[in-house]
């Protein structure tokens, strides 16, 4: 990968925002906050460019890094040796092939734009603050941010039950949408990792966290699907799903039917706590808001726990499957369960009655995983034990192709050009 030296003009923004550090991080190079010059930049050629956000556990806290890569294939390099740690643990989001990325400040609800120029330079731009509307900061994931066009985007803040509308071209807030219908007494609502478009609608998966009798946090035994019309910015329907915790992952099959399933995290919180609902899959037929099918995942797994669903092709999906016999006896926390080498991939045709196929030949690794749609393909993260490294895997088209390996845990990845 070729890099070139680029000049950066000083910004009038406060240095307390740690933006100089983030500019360095995004350039996969070194930024001196007392200098006008950035060493590094984006690849100069016309090939693809991806932004990866990476978190590394230091023992006492999670440090965040960012790196640019020109390929997601195996053998490509994601080197943190030239990246810079972000003190506030930020994250990067952005529209597919928009030639721009937005840094989520880890300490304040705001976004800062970074543009990738044809000459290989990375230009830090304007900042928009959501402080008057939102508290989304460190707990945000890529699923909290939806980009529709150059002039329209959403920030989904389930903590304040608000969607903030903003204009990326002007970096201004344009309105809000009331999401108070998702509120549940004593519970904290969280958005799923990947909202999706179903025709003219945006579908958002909502799950809930709360305290059990033992004082430990766990998922509530209920979830919700929010159907919203981005044209009118109005909520069309709220579909409550009882006896099913942690719904996060969704996809549409070739007929337009929507499938939604529980996340792996519901398993981990229930195993170490005293609350939570069983993991499930639901189907909402195209053009309706009806839950036509409700399936407990344990009914399809021969007793194994399973969660986190990623479309391979049609109605076939990959899941994370936990073999509890492989858990260390001293695994007492959610991170110890999710990070144990006790998880396998499983394949399941949701339209059949066949049980899940546990793919032990693919090996075991940690359970925590996220999925991303990039260039029409489904990429998922596969983490090593203890989250010391993450491999991106392309599961599209019925296959399983391991790609780039990155240190730590990949928390977001998208293509900027």
Image (spheres, helix red, strand yellow):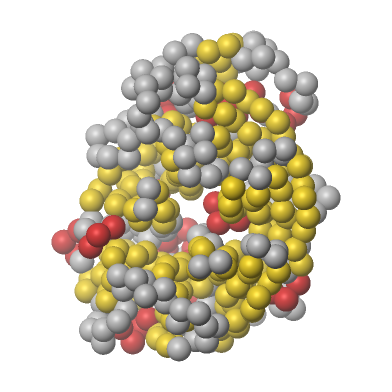
Q: Is residue 357 above or below residue 38?
A: below
Q: Find residue 280 and report its image quarter.
A: bottom left
Horizontal side of 347 relative to 196 (left or right) equals left
Q: Residue at x 46, y 67 (%)?
A: 249
Q: Residue at x 71, y 60 (%)?
A: 163
Horizontal side of 103 relative to 59 (left or right) equals right
Q: Residue at x 36, y 71 (%)?
A: 253
Q: How many marks?
A: 0
- Tell me if residue 371 can be seen: yes
Horizontal side of 120 relative to 48 (left or right) equals right
Q: Find residue 52 and report its image quarter.
A: top left
Q: Residue furthest right?
A: 132
Query: Which is more toward the observer, 333 or 372?
Result: 372
Q: Find residue 400 and report its image quarter.
A: bottom left
Q: In the rendered view of the protein, which quadrant contains the C terminus?
A: top left
Q: Position of residue 27 (x, y in %)?
A: 50, 25
- Tell me if residue 386 can be seen: no
Q: Is residue 279 above or below residue 202?
A: below
Q: Residue furthest left?
A: 361
Q: Is residue 37 above or below residue 77?
A: above
Query: Which is more toward the observer, 298 or 77?
Result: 77
Horizontal side of 365 relative to 155 (left or right) equals left
Q: Residue at x 37, y 64 (%)?
A: 310
Q: Position of residue 53 (x, y in %)?
A: 49, 40
Q: Position of residue 355 (x, y in %)?
A: 25, 82
Q: Position of residue 186 (x, y in %)?
A: 73, 76
Q: In the rendered view of the protein, which quadrant contains the N terminus?
A: top left
């Amino acid at each position: 990968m070729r890099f070139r030296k680029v000049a950066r003009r000083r910004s009038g923004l406060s240095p307390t925002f740690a933006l100089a550090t983030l500019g360095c991080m995004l350039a996969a190079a070194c930024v001196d906050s007392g200098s006008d010059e950035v060493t590094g930049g984006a690849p100069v050629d016309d090939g693809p460019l991806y932004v990866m956000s990476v978190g590394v556990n230091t023992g006492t806290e999670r440090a965040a890094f960012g790196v640019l890569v020109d390929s997601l294939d195996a053998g490509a390099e994601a080197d943190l040796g030239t990246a810079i740690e972000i003190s506030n643990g930020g994250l990067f989001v952005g529209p597919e092939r928009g030639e721009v990325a937005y840094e989520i400040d880890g300490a304040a609800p705001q976004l800062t734009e970074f543009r990738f120029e044809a000459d290989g330079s990375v230009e830090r731009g304007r900042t928009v603050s959501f402080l008057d509307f939102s508290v989304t900061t460190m707990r945000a994931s890529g699923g909290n941010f939806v980009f529709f066009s150059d002039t329209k985007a959403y920030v989904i803040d389930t903590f304040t039950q608000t969607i903030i509308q903003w204009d990326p071209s002007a970096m201004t807030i344009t309105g809000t949408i009331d999401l108070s219908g998702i509120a549940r007494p004593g519970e904290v609502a969280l958005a799923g990792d990947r909202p999706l478009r179903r025709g003219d609608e945006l579908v958002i998966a909502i799950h809930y966290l709360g305290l059990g009798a033992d004082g430990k946090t766990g998922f509530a035994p209920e979830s919700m699907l929010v159907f919203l019309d981005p044209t009118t910015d109005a909520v069309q329907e709220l579909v409550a799903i009882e006896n099913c915790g942690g719904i996060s992952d969704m996809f549409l099959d070739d007929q337009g039917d929507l499938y939604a399933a529980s996340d792996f995290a519901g398993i981990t919180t229930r195993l170490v706590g005293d609350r939570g609902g069983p993991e499930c899959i639901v189907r909402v037929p195209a053009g309706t808001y009806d839950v036509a099918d409700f399936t407990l995942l344990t009914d399809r797994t021969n007793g194994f726990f399973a969660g986190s669903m990623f479309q391979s092709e049609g109605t076939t999906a990959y899941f994370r499957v936990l073999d509890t016999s492989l858990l260390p006896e001293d695994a007492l926390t959610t991170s110890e369960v999710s990070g144990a080498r006790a998880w396998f991939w499983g394949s399941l045709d949701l339209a059949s009655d066949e049980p899940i196929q546990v793919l032990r030949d693919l090996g075991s690794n940690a359970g925590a995983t996220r999925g991303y749609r990039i260039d029409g393909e489904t990429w998922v993260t596969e983490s090593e034990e203890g989250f010391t490294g993450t491999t991106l895997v392309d599961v599209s088209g019925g296959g399983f192709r391991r790609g780039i390996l990155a240190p730590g845990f990949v928390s977001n990845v998208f293509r900027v050009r």
